[in-house]
Image (cartoon, rainbow, N blue to C red):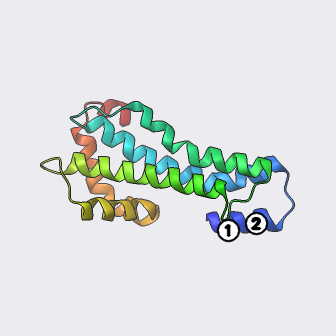
Amino acid sequence: MSVVAQMIASGVALPPVARGALISLPIGLICGWLWAVFNVSRHASLTPISPYWDWIFAIPPAVALAAGLAGWSTQNSPAAFAIFLALFIGLSLAAKTLERVDAANGAPSVGRMLGTAVLMYFAPVGVWVLRGKILRVTARSDDVALIT
């Protein structure tokens, strides 16, 4: 979806606001999904996790919007690197937190975290595959009333 947005944004003369919104929408959807998984996992965690990590999920769409408004390139550029880096950190943080809460001993293997990260990146498939795990983690949460 992001590739289609890039092709449309580069081929059509759009106002800067529309271009920025078109570029940041798919990235924002991905980050919203990652943040939701992280938030559910964080509330179910026995060890406290800082709420300041929530900001990492807002960085990729914000940088994409700024790049679209300013007319910066989002291909092989510092803006693209910033988006990728923040998205990578958010993805790994969400996968690690979900697996840590779901693991019986609280120490999941690297392979499980990597597999969860790949499934979370491919959200249409990951939603269905990870559904059971997310529901188990949600059931352990003290804040189930806030989530449901």
In this picture, is 33 found above or below 145? Answer: below
What SS does tag 1 mark?
helix
The one of 10 and 4 positioned closer to us in this rendering = 10
Quadrant holding the C terminus: top left
Quadrant holding the N terminus: bottom right
Q: How crowded is mark 1: few (under 14 residues within 10 Å), some or many (20 or more)?
A: few
The picture places residue 129, in percent across and down from the top left corner, at 33, 63
State left or right for residue 91 relative to residue 48.
right
Residue 130, quarter of the rendered image: bottom left
Q: Residues within 10 Å of mark 2 (few under 14, many from 20)?
A: some
Residue 116, quarter of the rendered image: bottom left
- Kindly give the residue lying farthest to the left in the view shown: 105
What SS does tag 2 mark?
helix
Q: Name the residue: 23% across, 34% down.
A: 47
Q: What residue sits right under mark 1 in the picture?
A: 4
The picture places residue 145, in percent across and down from the top left corner, at 32, 30
The picture places residue 140, in percent across and down from the top left corner, at 21, 39
Q: Name the residue: 64% across, 47% down.
A: 63
State left or right for residue 47 relative to residue 120.
left
Q: Name the residue: 21% across, 49% down.
A: 102
In contact (CB < 8 Å): disc 2 and disc 1:
yes
In this picture, is 23 found above or below 35? Answer: below
Mark 2 vs mark 1, CA separation in Å: 6 Å
Q: What residue sits right under mark 2 in the picture?
A: 8
The one of 42 and 138 positioned closer to us in this rendering = 42
The picture places residue 83, in percent across and down from the top left corner, at 58, 53
The amino acid beneath tag 1 is: Val
The amino acid beneath tag 2 is: Ile
